[in-house]
Amino acid sequence: MMRSRVFVVLAIMLLCCSGSHVFAQLGAQATDLSDAAKTFVSTCEKGDFAAAVQPFDATMQKVMPAEKLRATWQALIGQAGALKHQVRTRAMKAQGYDIVFVTCEFALVRVDVKVVFDAKKQIAGLFFLPADTSIDYRSAPYARLTSFRSIEVTLGSGEWALPGTMTLPQGKGPFPALVLVHGSGPQDRDETIGPNKPFRDLAEGLASQGIAVVRYEKRTHAYPQKMAKLKNLTVNEESVYDAVAAVKLLQNTPGIDPKRVFVLGHSLGGMILHRVVKLAPQVRGLISMAGGTRPLDKVILEQSTYIASLDKKDSVENVKRIAAIRADLARLHDPNITKTPETLIMGASVHYLLDINTINPPRDAMRLTQPMLILQGGKDYQVTEVDFANWKSALSGRKDVTFKFYPNLFHLFMPGNKTPADYEKPAHVEKHVVDDIATWIKGVR
């Protein structure tokens, strides 16, 4: 689902810890740690996972033993294709941790292997992320920057307070308002993926049309260390509670119409709208943007198989990788798996995956009274036309549900070709998607 990061399999790989989104450059030890990170990647590429886990700290040794690292690496290869070469490294520092990004060229897409080192130079965290090329981002042409102002806000309070941005139209209002809920993975407030920032596109585009928008750092992005320590993590702690906090923030903001606050969920965010409404029933309307409808393990396998089909040169290895992924996911259906809910499957805890698999978005949406807008791209291989059909089958009888299908757009609602390379091309959420959302919100009274 994407999370949010490019692939579902990659998106859920929050393995241990990382730093915050505010970094400082490393000092003299950057070269040593960069070499260590590169060596780690090379060791994984060689398949020597027993050696690769040697630099792990005690926590990583527990949650990511050699066989689990092997399965994780195989899942990565299954999604991104074979590793061709390491492109570059960059080093940063956050909250006492040193972080090295090893940008790797895989057969199908570039990936940043994010290796987190503690003070003892042990590996304390590991992430696989789409290569970050967003430094050259420019606002979409349809964003009229003088028609709104951006305000830094804080969602909630206490240990899980989150930084965010509210784009508020110029004028007195009262304005309708929208909360943006991320896909899976440790997303930032812009839902940055490669060179693209779809949530910033939406926020600025909609604010240009008189709709206030709140977007915020996902909890797994702002507090990765604390989140990694949660024993019974569910999607509620990951996403739902913070979406509810964003709704309350908007309802108490001067210039916002408290009776016209809407929620848009992208990918995983589109799956959990019913849980948000359960805690915030005053929400006026809901938008599912490439919202999944099926169990996550089935979707992961489907995506991995599709990605493997694009790689014609390594079919034997791809068969082995898919078999390994299938075997790992099959454990989720072992009746005894609930006895060890802390077990990791594809980098996510069983407890988390079982919680996700209780969600049936179309069925759950049938019980809601809020009007809905369902959006789907035809070039999306992560959330597909099968999911769109599931939404229509459940909700097409309701007059207050609108369906929009965009044949040439992929998961980020940008033009695509149904391949991982789509995520590396700089683009913006298509203007007609922003216009459709704005028109729908303004039409709901």
Image (spheres, rainbow, N blue to C red):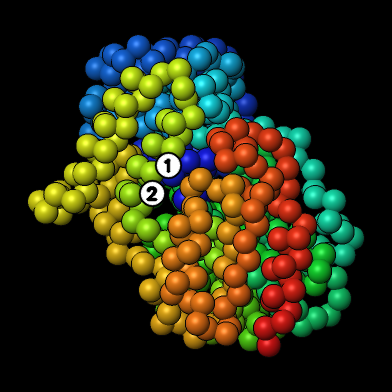
Q: In this view, does 380 lie above or below 53?
A: below
- Any part of residue 262 in sight: yes
Residue at image position (58%, 59%) is: 376
Q: Residue 79 location in percent, x, y?
A: 44, 33
Q: In this view, does 207 lie above or below 426?
A: below
Q: Residue 117 location in percent, x, y?
A: 43, 26
Residue at image position (55%, 48%) is: 380
Kindly check if marks 1 and 2 are in contact, taking CB atoms under 8 A apart as contact: yes
Looking at the picture, which amino acid does disc 1 mark?
Answer: Gln
Residue at image position (74%, 74%) is: 439
Q: Which class describes the residues within 10 Å of circle 2: few (<14), some (14-19), or many (20+)?
A: many
Q: State the separation of the CA atoms marked 1 and 2.
A: 6 Å
Residue at image position (82%, 65%) is: 208
Q: Which of 150 and 104 is in front in this view?
A: 104
| Quadrant that contains the C terminus | bottom right
Q: Residue 63 location in percent, x, y?
A: 26, 36
Q: Residue 435 location in percent, x, y?
A: 76, 65
What SS does tag 2 mark?
A: helix
Looking at the picture, which amino acid does disc 2 mark?
Answer: Val
Q: Point out which mark residue 299 bears.
A: 2
- On the image, numbered disc 1 is attached to which residue? 303
What SS does tag 1 mark?
A: helix
